Image: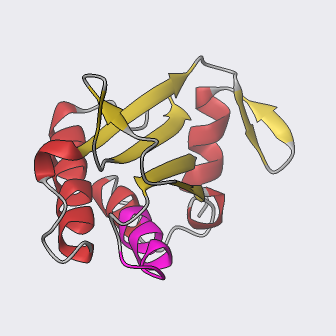
Amino acid sequence: MPLTLTLSEGVLPVGKEKEAVQLITDSLLKNHGLTGNTVMTPNITANVHIVPKGSSFSGGEEFLGAWAEWKVPSFALADQAVIKQHFAEVTEIIYKLSGGKQSKDNIYVNVVHAVDGGWNLDGKAMNNEELGAAISEG
């Protein structure tokens, strides 16, 4: 389940990116009842992108922003209560790690769902049923 964390330069102090990824990963696992799951935990991956100052825009104007985007199977982040809780936690994580400097209004979280069968785990394409079975073993 890849996370893409994109940050305007200066949103987080240098070196806080790793902590942000760990806390966001922990939140996703917790909110799905999968903390400690040996199948899911190593299959949550992340990329961090730092956008140079002057290269992030809102309404055509420069600003500082943070974006957390998940790509997940259709059954993950599908329950509204889970979505609201996790998105609120991600927003709070970025806000706190920024030292309270990053406006919560400019922290964005979203999810993109893969079609059933459009997911690869351990080198094998799996549908939702197969994924669920593999995850339940962890």
Residue 3, percent from left and from top: 52, 49
Residue 65, percent from left and from top: 31, 47
Quadrant of the image occupied by residue 93: bottom left
Quadrant of the image occupied by residue 79: top left
- Please give left or right for residue 44 compared with residue 58 in the image: right
User: At 53% across and 48% down in the image, what residue appears?
Assistant: 4
- Specify the quadrant that holds the C terminus: bottom right
The residue nearer to you, when weighing 113 against 102, is: 102
Q: Is residue 97 visible to us here?
A: yes
Reply yes or no: does residue 24 show up in magenta. Answer: yes
The residue nearer to you, when weighing 125 against 8, is: 8
Seen in the picture, residue 101 relative to 116 is either above or below; the reply is: below
Seen in the picture, residue 29 relative to 78 is either above or below; the reply is: below
Q: Furthest-top residue in view?
A: 115
Magenta segment, which residues?
Answer: 13-25
Residue 94, percent from left and from top: 27, 64
Seen in the picture, residue 6 relative to 127 is either above or below; the reply is: below
